[in-house]
Amino acid sequence: MVLSKSENDKDNMKPTLQHTLEEFNDCVDFVHYTFPEIGMEMLFFEHLVGSDHFTRDVTVPFSNASSDEARRLLNHSQYVEINENKPFIKAILDGAVAIFFENSSYVVDVSKPDSRSIEQSETEAIITGPHDSFNEVAETNLALVRRRVKSSHLKTMRLEVGEVTKTSVYVLYIKDLANMEYVNELHSRISKIEIDAVLDGNMLVQYIEDFPNSIFPLIPTTERVDAAVSKLISGRIIVIVDGSPSVISAPASFFEFFSSPDDYYQRWMLGTATRLLRFVAFIITVTFTAMYVSVTTFHYEMIPEDLLLTLTESRSRVPFPPIYEALLLESTIELLREAGARLPTKIGQTIGIVGGIVIGQAAVQAGLTSNILIIAVASSAIASFVIPSYVMSASIRLIRFGLIILAGLLGNLGLMMGLIMIVIHLSGLTSLKASYLSPVAPMKIKDWQDVFMRAPFAWLKERPTISRSPNMRRNKMKQ
């Protein structure tokens, strides 16, 4: 949105009562409050100010004040004189009270926005560890981070995104741990965004990613405070967007989407086993249904003899080729998943469980699908839930449809071609100009102890290579 010359002139002019009233004309929640005895005018939005703050800083001090007393009160630090129209209007929209007195204009911050209490994240639930999560107020989120990182090296930068919404965006990093090239690059990308509105952190991510058209998420978001703080300590940068409970962290690698804070709050062997299980689940959810289609269409010789009879009998009543059968059942599973997510929690769980059982059993009895495909599709669906990141899980589910089509057309050759294309695509991706497949490409075997396994804390003596931190040493345990 480009401002004309006349609009720029209005922004730079001295604030006046008449112009401010015209600016907020037809706003029923805009209040014009007057103290006629001393010639003071006050303007504010009644739903943005806190009643206690308003009483303390406005009503009580000026109710019975004389002109001399009002003049003396306005010299106090909480009353800020502003001589330009644009920041003056912005302050009112942020919840300040505008005061006009003796040809001067002041603002006093008495805002108290409503917000959710600190609750547990519903999308990133864990068994052990802290349960507090971010909410939609940026100041609260900053306080949650500061409470855990009690260091003067934690730095914050504030930017404003959205020509209409004027959304506050905070970039946080720890000095001497974060690489300043990453900080400057991220700051540059956010400051170049020109859009009317940014409503959520996941929306901002799509404007700052290296490859916005890739199916894979390149920059993770989290609602968990401990997860965001761990990113900071590992040398990453986090971004807090006002109005969003999702905090962004960068740079990131593909393998980070398979780790969970839970891994670090339990014994390292259990954490390692759970993490390996997620990678197995990734392989299952991507290939299991596609492998069924490939084998039953082109490669019956791969099926054991005992199983071949069962499979042949199961498929004898199915009138469709395996590819149509698999796509139909996968689409049904996705419909049930989406319906369960959109309905109220108790109803959604019932729809997911009962709907899956009823439709699956009815489909087999009607001869629309085979028993073994039901098992394959159900296993793939369950495996996708094991992946902690919902965004990554959704991307993988979409990839599964492409692999099923390739397997149905070309068999195992098509399946392998699809997997090779995925690997090639992943190899070309970057996150904030850092390799997306780090530490596999480039190969950093030392980092594998916190990627494919969760090694004991005594072994994790350095930060991840992808952070390119100026201070790689992080764990100095006394022996």
Image: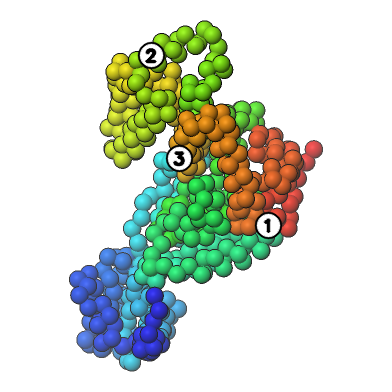
Between 12 and 156, the residue placed more toward the observer is 12
Answer with the quarter of the image where residue 353 lies: top left
Q: Is residue 478 visible?
A: yes
Left or right of 430, for residue 397: left
- The answer to whether any part of residue 57 appears in the image is no
Q: Seen in the image, is 356 located left or right of residue 209? A: left
Gap between marks 3 and 1 measured at Cα: 37 Å
Answer few, some or many: residues within 10 Å of disc 3's Cα (few below 14, many 20 plus, some between 14 and 19).
Answer: few
Question: What residue would you read off at disc 1?
Answer: 177
Q: CA distance from mark 2 to mark 3?
A: 29 Å
Q: Position of residue 208 (x, y in %)?
A: 52, 60
Q: Residue at x 48, y 57 (%)?
A: 206
Amino acid at dot 2: Ser
Q: Which mark is residue 463?
A: none
In the image, residue 460 sits, relative to residue 433, either above or below, namely above
Q: Reading the chain from its start, which is encountered first: label 2 or label 3?
A: 2
Foreground mark, 2 or 1, reads: 2
Please give the name of the residue rendered at 70% of the width and 55% of the height, measured from the top-left corner: 468
Dot 2 alpha-carbon crowd within 10 angstroms: few under 14, some 14 to 19, many 20 or more: few
Disc 3 marks which amino acid?
A: Leu
What amino acid is at disc 1?
A: Leu
State the SS at label 3: helix
User: x, y (%) of residue 80?
Assistant: 42, 80
* Along the line of sight, the residue nearer the viewer: 328 or 431: 328
Image quarter where the N terminus lies is bottom left
Q: Quadrant of residue 276?
A: top right
Checking the image for residue 398, the label placed there is: 3
Residue placed under numbered mark 2 in the picture: 316
Q: Nearer the viewer, mark 3 or mark 1?
A: 3
Residue in the picture at 39% in, 29% down: 324
Residue 105 in the image: state x and y as whole percent: 36, 85
